[in-house]
Image (spheres, rainbow, N blue to C red):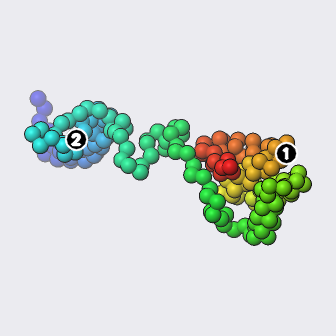
Amino acid sequence: MVALPLSCAKINFEGETNMRHLITPLIICAALYGVACNPAAPTENTSAPTNSTNATSTTTNAPATTATPTTGVPPISSAHGGDTAAPAAPASANEKPEGVDTAALDAKIAKAEAKAKAPNATESDRLAAAAAYKERADIYMNAGRPNLYKFALGDYRRVLRYQPNNEDAQKNIDMLISIYHQLNKPVPTNGLEQ
């Protein structure tokens, strides 16, 4: 063996210390990664049992992603484009769209609808109600705001109630339904009520 001068031994010792400073963080990061990203990590069931004689807690090896969601929280798959979204609540008759002033059309629709629903209503009364609904639906549709599309859809459906052969209303209904499908959103049901 060859004896090294003391100065060489010191350099060698400092080199080992510097190497330890480089390797230690890498080992710690690898260990943390292994613990955090292990899909088969045991999860502990901490829910209290309903039977008082069985008071032990169980441990399962199920992945955390298969846990059942709590009430009010959507399933995990819906956040990733799954088709588990709940149906949209219909726009109620008293729900008003914001940002669009349709007060004059609302009054016109109320008057035309009252005439169209009268027992002695004529075809022109039904066509007037359909035209009033279509006018308001066009305003909602052409506003370019997706939050108004449900109101347009409801009014176009009401147009077809009074004028079943209105091709423009049917074309716009089909287009709005297509938009909702492209956005992966449920199609509103307003306008389907009788």
**Residue 64: percent from the left, percent from the top?**
33, 38
User: Which residue of the protein is positioned furthest toward the front in this rendering?
Assistant: 119
Image side of residue 120 versus residue 24, left or right = right
Q: Which label sits on residue 47?
A: none
**Label 1 vs label 2: CA separation?**
59 Å
Q: Is residue 53 left or right of residue 128?
A: left
> From this viewpoint, is residue 12 visible?
no
Compare residues 180 and 53 and report the one nearer the observer. 53
Q: Which residue is mark 2?
A: 45
User: Which of the 4 image quarters holds residue 8?
Assistant: top left
Q: Mark 2, residues whose alpha carbon is within 10 Å: few (<14), some, or many (≥20)?
A: few
Give the percent coordinates (x, y) of residue 145: 70, 58
84 to the left or right of 186: left
Q: Which amino acid, by three-letter code, is at mark 2?
A: Asn
The residue at the point 25 percent across, 32 percent down is: 61
Give the image location of residue 9, x and y in percent. Answer: 16, 43
> Which is nearer the N-term, disc 1 or disc 2?
2
- The residue pinned by badge 1 equals 166
The residue depicted at 64 percent of the width and 60 percent of the height is: 93
